[in-house]
Amino acid sequence: MSPSVPRPLYRSPSALWWAAVLSGLVASACSRDGGKGSDGGPGNQDALPPPSALRIEPVDPVLLVPAGASESLRFRAWFRESSGREIEVSEESTWNIAPPELGRFSGPLLETTPSRGGRGSVVASYRGMVATTTITIRVEEVALGPGANSDIASRLDREASPGPSPELLYPFDRVMLPPNLRSLEFHIRPNGGEAFELRFESSIARLRLIFGCAERVGDGCILPIDSRLWERLRNAAPRGEALRYRLRAATPAGNVHESEERTLFFAEEGISGGVYYWNAGEGSIDRFEFGVPGARPERFIDVRRTGARTCVGCHALSRDGSRIAVGTDFPTTTLQVFEVARRNRLFMLGNHNDFFPQQPNFFSFSPDARALVTSSLRGLRILDASTGAVMAEGLGGGPASQPDWSPDGNHIVFVRHDGGRAAGLNDVPGVKSGRIAVIHREGSGWSAPRELVAMPNVNHYYPAYSPDGRFIVYCRSPSNSNSTGSDDGSMGSDDEPTFVRDAELWIIPSDGSGPARKVNVISGLGDSWPKWDPTTYEHEGHPLFWLSWTSRRAYGLRLREGEQAQIWMAAFNPEAAARGEEGFYPPFWLPFQNIRTSNHIPQWVTRVERQPCRTNKDCPGEFCFEGRCFATPPLL
């Protein structure tokens, strides 16, 4: 796990942590003079009273604390003598709260930390005895969003009544979000409402987000969540617990109607590294660095830098982000490999003016970034990633496309196909009747292919290894449509692929030990180019992965189904998938995209490499920001 991955602002202690705290308090208390004397009073070390001889009040209290404020709560401790009589020992007891950031004790009086919610334990110790109870502190806050004022808040204080309920269109129920996404939109359909509230609740917080219809789109309204509101949402969600919410709407007649409850989750760790994607409208490779607050999308490689005739599209990056391979035009006229930090071109194969392009359309780096496997009608070819020299060729037994190198370097998954319309070409941009196959490293060479997925008159394509190499996600077209979306494998207008309307996302264990399964929870319209973030994250002590892909599914009120190709993302629980469960959480739209351009092939890296700098002079045509060059500097 990369030490640079940010952690949430607050984590609840684990059960083992509590056990350690309580056992330490017990040991400390028992080391002092304690026990029951011959007269029934405390002081004899020969016989300690049972733990039930000490109790505290209140039991399991829940405190509701206004945001920015603190609350006081007085606890009481009672000792039961051998006769059964109880005496109060509140002032004589030692009081502690854990975790300590929830508040502090002055004698038996607890003062909570302002705006700090959470669940913890209150522990009292007295003469060798320990008593404990849980405590829950819930922060209550009212936040005003766009178009809101205090008058709107008062109108939404009323109880909900029967009537036409407002609708939540986006985000989807049960979605999991990375904590450093920092931006989100709620899309709603008012159904007669004119003032709105999103009421979020968890065990540690109640947040009322009041807003008006500041942005109307079609028959609905959009509420943007900026970084300020984002932090409020994050702080309202305890570790491992869903944040529950409802949409409430006030009508002109003064009634309040309410939607059904939905939930969302925040992952434990923020996404690190970044993503490089094809901006088809501009014919360029753009990038976005997730680990930098205020980051904005940047142009990375374009026609000018590569000398392409029309566009730069297909691309692959090494997992560590140090190298990028790009193909120019379509079909590919040149294959070029660059060192990422300074954009130095390491080599170029092919000619921009070649009438019959001979360069591969698809490629993937080895885990150490030293080799590049490429597609070809003559089988997979492996090149030296620094020079382009051929290291091996003819792998896979015939036409082979869309390779992906496994994280351990010992396997390559690819698509076997029948060649298609390939007169005069060394490779084709699209496949039909594709079969998912794998080759394995054998000594200094590679094995014969083994097909994992093959069905007559069905197309399987774009396979990608999960970060641990245990799963392969791929696309499937039941109608056997060409993977470019056109019958002849050609492009649509503006060098953008048309799309396969019946494309679905499927997953299979990479060793073939289980059946292939359709991923229903994330499949949409025209799904394409699934790619994994190569980093393994942790959530609740278990691994968590992230998958991105291109889809033409509807995006709330902003995009109709089939209208525009955009990049979507979803969390994946590999342990659940290994048990035969779905594994995926519902998807979300990546918010840094230009919604007016089609975006494809989201290639993730563990680190975004940049040229180091001291001033802007060190970054020709760019900006020096915190010692690194940015084409578009982050917003502070």
Image: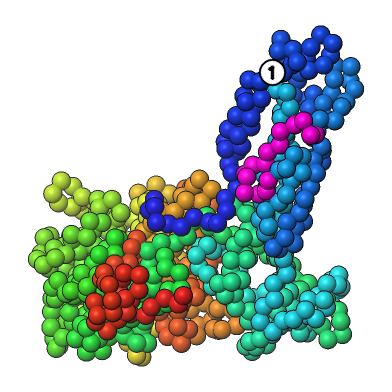
Residue 202 shown left or right of residue 400 in the figure = right
Residue 327, compared with residue 78, is above or below; it is below
Residue 16 shown left or right of residue 474 in the figure = right
Residue 104 shown left or right of residue 475 in the figure = right
Amino acid tagged 1: Asp
Taking depth in this image into account, of 105 and 5 the one nearest to the observer is: 105
- In terms of secondary structure, where does tag 1 sit? loop
**Image point 82% across, 26% down: which residue?**
79
Picture coordinates of residue 564, whole percent (x, y): 47, 83
Q: In which quarter of the image is residue 297?
A: bottom left
Tell me the magenta residue range. Answer: 90-104
Picture coordinates of residue 583, whole percent (x, y): 51, 55
Q: Quadrant of residue 125?
A: top right
Residue 148, compared with residue 461, is above or below; it is below
The residue at which mark 1 appears reads as 33
**Image point 69% across, 72% down: which residue?**
143
Q: Is residue 450 visible?
A: no
Q: Can residue 259 be seen in this view?
A: yes
Specify whether residue 367 is painted magenta: no
